[in-house]
Each structure stands twice: as C-alpha cells, then as structure tokens.
Image (spheres, coloured by chain):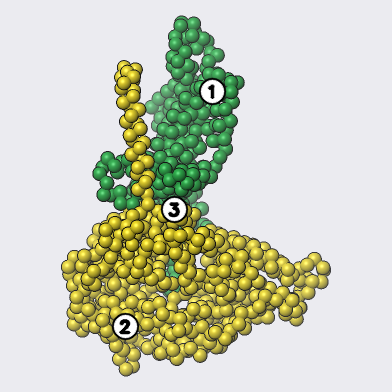
Amino acid sequence: MASSNPRSGARARFRLLLAAAALLCLACQARPTAEAGGGILVVATGADFTGPNELLSASRIDSEVRSNLFLRLLQEQPDYHHHPPTFAPELARDWAFSEDRLTLTFALRDDVLWSDGVPVTAEDVRWTWQAQTAPEVGWSWAYAKEAIRDVEVVDPHTVRFHFSRAYPTQLLDVNEGFILPRHAWGRLPLGEWRQRADWFLDHLVVSGPFTIARWQPQQELVLAPNPRYFESGLPRLERAVFRVLPEESARLAQLLAGQIHVMEGIPPGQAARVAAHPELDLQALWSRQYSYIVWNACRPLFAEPEVRRALTLAIDRQGLIEALYEGYARIATSPILSSVWAHDDSLQPWPYDPQEARRLLAAQGWRDGDGDGILDRDGQPFRFELSTNTGNQLRRDALVLIQEQLRRAGIDAAPRFLDGQALTAANTAHDFDATLSGWAIDTSLDVRYAFHSSEIDDGYNFGCYANPEVDALIERIAGTQEPRDAEPLFHRLQHLLHREQPYTFLWEPQWLVGLDRRIEGASPNALLTFFDLERWHLRPR
Amino acid sequence: MTGFLLRRVAASALLLLLVLTATFLLLHLAPGDPLGLLAHPRVPPEQREALRQLWGLDQPLAARYLRWLGGVVRGDWGTSFLFRRPAGAVLLAALPNTLLLGGAALLVQLVVAVPLGVAAGRRPGSPLDHGIRVGSLLLYSLPTFWVGLMALLLFAYGLGLFPPSHLHGVGAESLSPGLRVLDLLHHLALPALVLGLTSAGGLLRFVRSSVLEAMGQPHVLAARARGLSERRVVWVHGLGSALGPLLQLLGLSLPALLGGALVTEVVFSWPGLGRLAWSAMLARDYPLILAVTAWSAALVLVGNLLADLLQAAADPRVREATHAV
C-alpha cells in the first residue's frame, strides 16, 4: 500500500506543507495595493448593488455607482449652504429658461459617445423622459416629472422641456435621473422592464467615466474605466471594487486593517479609532438627515402645542448628542437643515429645562396628584408609547435615554420597537402615540409631505399636524419662481414649526467617511461620497 | 420498501406545502409591505397605489396565494424585490456557495468528531476522555456567531493568516485557475472550520457513547477473542455497529448545518443562502424569502427522509413497523 511507504508519506507531507505555504502566501496579498496608474480602489458597502437601471431600483449605493456610469444633463453642486444649489455642465454645456419659465432649452455636448461608440443625442433625453414617466415602468421618482408637459427634440444636440407651470425647482426636477441609452435599452418594451431587470446588465452601454467590468451579487462589483469617456485622461483609477460587507463591524475591521480604502457611515462611537489611525483620514460631512420625535396630535394627549413644547424642553438633546454621537451631530431646530441656505439662523433651540416643562404642563392641568412621580390630569396619568424601528442601535439607545429624561419630568414613556415596515404602516395609519425616526431631505426643500394638512390622510403627515398658515406658506413656496425669493417664507414656516413643535427636532448627524490617506483627488460630500470618482487615484505606497 | 418510500415522499411533499403556506400567510399578514421601504415620501399617494398594483400588492390575499402557488408549480418563484431578478435564479446562484461551505464544514465535523469520539469511547474515564468530553461540551455550547467573531479577530485581523470575508480576494479573476482554487480554499478555511467545529460537539459525544456501548457487546468481545488487531476491533466491529444511527444523525444534521451556515455566512460575508435569507428578510422580499424557505424546508425533509431510509435499510424492524402502521 502506498501509504505504508515512508518515503511516499514524506512526499505527501511535503506537498501538504507546500499547499499550506501557498495558502499563507495568498494571505499576504490581502491588502489592496496601488498598482501602476491610478491603482485599484477597494470600497466596502453594506448593501448590494441592484442593477444599472435606476428606473427599477434605488438605494444609496445604487446612486453612487450609477453616477459614475451615466451622465445627467447637469451636475448638482454641493454648494447649497449659502444659496440654492448651482449646477455645472455635464451632458449639457448650456441651458436657458424662456421668459415665462415655461420652456427650458439645453444645448448638449456634441462629443459625448455611449461606450459602444453611438453618439449621445437629444433623442436619448426625450426617450429617457418617456421611460421615466411610463406607468408600466413605475419609477419611484416619476413625481419629479409631473409638471413636464413634453420634451421636444430641436436638433440632435438641442432639447427643450415644456412645463405646465413655473415653480422654483424646475431645474432640479428636470435633472432628476440619468440619461439612458435609447438605442440599446429601447429594444426592450417598457412593459417588460420590471420582469427583466437583469437584461439591462447584459445590454449595458454607459456614458459616464466607468463601466461595469464584473458584478457578482452578494460579493463585489468591479468598475473599470470607460475608454470612450469624453474627458481625456479620466478616470484615473484602474478599477474601483465595491465589496459587499453587510456587517458594520466587519467593514470597520477591514478599514482599520488596511484591507479596504473607503468606508462610509462610520458609527460615531468608532470615529475616534479611525481618526487616530495613522493611515486613515476621517471626514465628517454635514449630512442631509435629521432625527425627530413626531407627536401624534390625532390623540388628545399631544393635541396642544404647549404640551409638545414641554416635551421638547424635557429632553436633553445636547446631552444625547454627546452620549450617542460623540459630538458628531448638532441640535436640529427645523426641517430645513442648518447647513442649507434657507435655514433660519435666528432660531434658537429650545433649551433643556425640565422645570419649565413641568410649569408648562401644570398650566395645562398636568400635576402629580397621587404622588407616584407621574403627572396626572382628570385621573389619567401622562403615559404613552414611544416607538422606533428595530435594527438601528443608535435609535434604540436614544429611546431608552429619552425615556429616562421624560421620567424625570413626570412623564411615563414606554418603549415600543417595530420593524421598519411595521413602523411605517403604524405611522401612516396614525396608530401610534409618538415615534422616534428620521428624514433624509433633498435640496428641493419640499416639506409638504410631513407638515401639510392634505398629507394627513394619504401622506406622511403622521402626527396629524394641521395649521392653515403652514399650509398656505407651503403652497406659496411651491408657487415662487425664484428659490431665493422664498427665503422669508421658509423662515416664517420654520418659526411656526419651532413654536408649535409638531416634531421635537432632535439632531442633525454628520456623515462619517473613513478614507485611506493615499487617496488623492477625492472630494466626498453629503450628496455623493464618490463624487467625481473619475478624479480619484491612489498614491503608490 | 417502494411503498414505504412513496408514503414518505408524499408525506414530505404535503409537509412542504404546509410550511410554504404558513410562511406565505405569516409574511403577508405582518403589518406593512415592501413599499414602505421603497416609496420616497414625496411620491404622491396615487403613484404609491400604482406601484402597489404593479407589484401585485393590491390583490386579496387568497388571489396572491393562488397566483404565487401557480407560479411555483411552473417553477416560477417570482421576481425578487431586492435583486430585481427571478428569485429562483438568485437562489441558484447562492446555492453552490452554501453547499461548498456546508460540505467543507461536514468534512471538518467528521474529521474531528469520529476519531476523537472513538478515542474517548475506547478509554472511558481516562484523562483523554475527560478532556475530549469537556472540549466537546464547550464546542456544543458556544454560539457559532461568537466563535466566528473570535476566529476573525484572532486569525484574520490579529495574525492575518486568513482573509476575513468573501469567496475570493480582490483581483482574484486575474489568477491562474490553480491559484484561484487555492484562493477559494484559503477563503473557505476559516468559515468551514468555525461551522464544522461548532457542529462537531454533538456528533463527537454520540460517537463516544456508541463506541463505549459497542465495546461491551458480545460480537466485539468475540472479535477480540479471535485475535483481531485492536484497530480492527474498534473501527470495524465497534464503530460498525454504530454506523446506522450515525448516518441517521448525519442526515438529521443537514438542516442544522444550513442553520449554522446562516450565521456563519453573515459573519464571514459568505455569499450563500444564509446571507441571502437574512437580506431578504430585512427587505421583506416575499418571493425570495419563500424560495429560500422552500429550499430550507426541502433540505430538512430530505434529511429526515434520508435518515429514515438509512435506518429502514439497516434495520428491517423499522420497515415492518412502518408498514404495520
């Protein structure tokens, strides 16, 4: 028998050792390296890419990737801090409104080709609009095109949008969505799009700086340069690899170990480790999100603005920010974020003042009559459920701390945890007392969905908030042609919301991004982390 | 035997239908729907309703169930909400990865449990036996996710011996086929060891008690009396009599391996069915959850069926008893 031969046994052991050595050698290659050229960028992402066609699906990582595959007419600039956002040319080199603002004409670049060599033309722009608004496609963002009556092809490189009305965010709405390849994707009837989403990957042509070299669902997406990209010398990276790592702790560990170059959404509690790492750079960006507690005014307990204001006074928001966000957040005062041009800087956050909260509540008849530490009125204790969604540890922790703070003011809030969909269902049915949640806002600054009384029945005005003056202000803002002219209206709106507290605006968190210090040319912002990815490159070690 | 087989297959199919129906009902009766995650707040109500219609979420529950069941019979599991591809295709893409991990873990389980179980069973009460018993209890008690995280911390992030996630390293597509296989094995090693070791505790104790019991049996004493080598007495005559129940236990442990794979796949970002199920549940991806549930339930049933068949093949009394019932 071969195994009884000592020499062959030694050979087998030697082979085994060789295999083990080879395996360990592979381990040495685990760190991503910068090769010749711009290098290979490795990014960790929690969610998987869902496909190239944005009309069928959307997530944060989808938007990041697609913004590097396709061009928009214009590129929205992250300069909305002091004025409405401006736009830089992208596929369009110039644009102009008619005097009545009912038509908007774009002059397109004539040197942009799809990756298969076909020119990008005005026909693509018109066809994209048709696909975006087709009911059978069911694009979630089709509402943005609601006021566009028609898209006219003037010539191959001139396209004109006709509007049914003029309003402040026309340019933003026209620019919503990438321009898609008519000659390639138009071959599949729109009615079949939803059933055959993977068809678009097989027929992918792109106009942006990158194309998809490889996509293995649940594993990784590899972007490679589009050789026909119109800007010569770009992109600089050889590859951008988006590796799917659902576990936040795994992403962080790989960032700290140098196995990935970029991680978005670093938990505040771990930011210090990233900041202290000699090879990493921590970027704290003011995000476009805020957290809030919505008080359900459909229920008598929260119907009075004074009671809602007292609840805000009873919550130590600065203390919570320090405890939960390690300072990477600031107190929110309105749905218009502090980093946005229309924010009313004169608004002062309600302070943490439990005594004033008790005084306000006492004026409303809430007193601790039976000495149990909980306020009562007409024999009913001040007791309610405070809900939030599962799967978000920060919110869970916040809810427990808020419960304790309210308790000190004589208010008994019982925590209630629901999964995301169940919470949304409960909120839209107004089947809740109070909910801790958050909104991500876009630069349109539209707050109708949350605060207009018409959104109580079918919309996202969860708390049944109704104030005729707020309704009128939202309408007037929507009817203002120049965004800048709406600034006083925005300020008045915020003043009313601040006074009446339909929400307790909790905090505006920062978006924390960890980047390898060898990355050059990166300019992440709150709109896109991988903004201008074509200019990113890795400095060799 | 054929009648026995047919009865068991029919009962398994019925059970599978019941599991899927219960899953379907539980999923659809839970509050909220997938649109809760997809609809942007600025989407007007009428458009949300149109989306609901497009996704078939506006239909009555019975109609949705019948339509879904009709599709399943035709092999169409519906389109995954999350991946926008046929749920069956998404599942099939992940299946080989889970089978690879499960197979490797089973190998680890056997390689660890059988020799150590035999060694402990041969010398009951010895320090070796005590050591193995404590070790197996420890393996049995430790949660897979904890062992996985510790293994990652120590061997992947600490010592850097193994990669912490995925099937392949970055840029593996440019490796030669041989190196690519090595790269895969390198990535497979840690999750397979974790899953295999944490599943080995129970099997090890079973092998130990089987060998211990068999060593006192007359046929083993007779083998020893015939002058056979100790190795042959233990491995052929001692372990041989425990083989039937051992195989049955292995059949029953198939679903347990799959359950453990869910946790291991999430911890090691291994792109298999477990991680798929986890993502599908978070996104309430009905078609994908149902497809994964069907596969898992089928595996449990096949495992049970295999166990019964092996036992029936090994012991005629089981066949006769089942027939009498």
Horizontal relation, residue A194 to residue A297: left or right: left
Q: Tell me where residue A248 appears, x and y as whole percent.
A: 48, 56
Co-location on one chain, circles 1 and 2: no
Front residue of A134 and B124: B124
As measured in the structure, the alpha-carbon distance from the residue carrying label 3 to the one carrying label 1 is: 41 Å
Q: Nearer the viewer, mark 1 or mark 2?
A: 1
Crowd rating for badge 1 (residues with CA inside 10 Å; few <14, some 14–19, many 20+): many
Helix, strand or loop at label 2? It is strand
| The quadrant where residue A151 appears | bottom left
Instruction: Locate the N terminus of chain A by quadrant.
Output: top left
Horizontal relation, residue B32 to residue A356: left or right: left
Front residue of A74 and B48: A74
Residue type at mark 3 is: Ala
Q: Residue at x 42, y 84 (%)?
A: A84
Q: Tell me where residue A367 appears, x and y as whole percent.
A: 78, 74
Q: Which chain is green?
A: B
First in residue order: circle 3 vs circle 2:
2
Residue at the limit of the structure toward the left, as seen here: A117
User: Which residue bears the numbered disc 3?
Assistant: A257
The numbered dot on residue A149 is 2
* Above or below A102: residue A17: above
The numbered dot on residue A482 is none
User: Which residue bears the numbered disc 1?
Assistant: B120
Residue type at mark 1 is: Ala
* Above or below B157: residue A500: below
Q: Residue at x 46, y 6 (%)?
A: B227
